[in-house]
Image (spheres, rainbow, N blue to C red):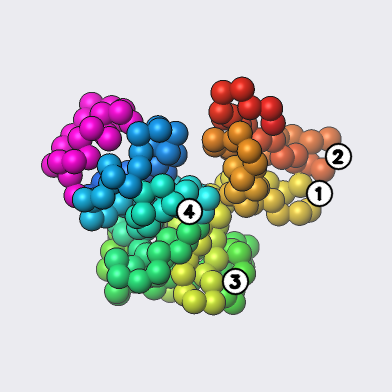
Amino acid sequence: MIFLPKFDPDAILKLMARATVMMGVPTFYTRLLQNPGLNKDVTRHMRLFISGSAPLLADTHREWSARTGHAVLERYGMTETNMNTSNPYDGDRVPGAVGFALPGVTVRVTDPETGTELPRETIGMIEVKGPNVFQGYWRMPEKTKAEFRADGFFITGDLGKIDDKGYVHILGRGKDLVISGGFNAYPKEIESEIDAMPGVIESAVIGVPHADFGEGVTAVLVCSKGADV
């Protein structure tokens, strides 16, 4: 195993010849994509690229595949649950999705207010149940009670959906949801559109107070040098 004191794209590309697997957060992949030294020759011997800890944008997934010939394997886990889902090692790794529930794990999407399970392709709160889920917060019985349903499902706090093929998609944290004029604005959906604009490297969408709509949407951008957005 190769450990570095900090993330350095140039160092990573130089050391990649000594590795076969890379595990990283989405920012690692966006930063490496900005490096002109990233190409199929550099990554030719690699067996697997894994992304986790935060949703990987579908555009980043596609660009990585085009540049390297490798499809990033994205998965989903939490401190409280360990691993919940994963795209298949052998099979379609869908951009913008974190894959299927792992063996023994049950994932469902519910109405955040009522806890009613929602049909597929409907956005709601992601809940999980299985032997991977912790028993509760240490010496915090009230918080534990608030985070678990009566039937044992853990409320992750993540908003998402399960598509018709069973792939789980994460659209952001419930606390990040922006309700503007009664309309639910999901930051990740907006960020995906902004990130597709020429000159935009990364974006973050947040809610701000709005006198008329209650909340307004504001985007913070990281742009390429000289970009006019």
Q: Which residue carries the number 1 mark?
A: 181
Q: Which residue carries the number 4 mark?
A: 62
Mark positioned earlier in the residue sequence (1 or 4): 4
Q: Residue furthest front?
A: 41
Q: Position of residue 188 (x, y in %)?
A: 58, 49
Q: Which residue carries the number 2 mark?
A: 212
* Residue type pointed to by label 3: Glu
Between the C-alphas of marks 2 and 3, the distance is 31 Å
* Residue type pointed to by label 1: Gly
Residue drawn at point x = 48 percent, y = 59 percent: 95
Residue drawn at point x = 43 percent, y = 74 percent: 151
Q: The residue tagged with tag 3: helix, strand or loop?
A: loop
Between the C-alphas of marks 4 and 2, the distance is 38 Å
Q: Position of residue 56 (x, y in %)?
A: 46, 50
Residue 120: in magenta span: no
Between the C-alphas of marks 3 and 1, the distance is 24 Å
Q: Which residue carries the number 3 mark?
A: 121
Q: Is the C terminus in the top left, top right, bottom left or bottom right quadrant? A: top right
* Residue type pointed to by label 4: Arg
Q: Position of residue 91 (x, y in %)?
A: 35, 71
Mark positioned earlier in the residue sequence (4 or 2): 4
For the record, the magenta segment spans 1-20
Between the C-alphas of marks 2 and 1, the distance is 8 Å
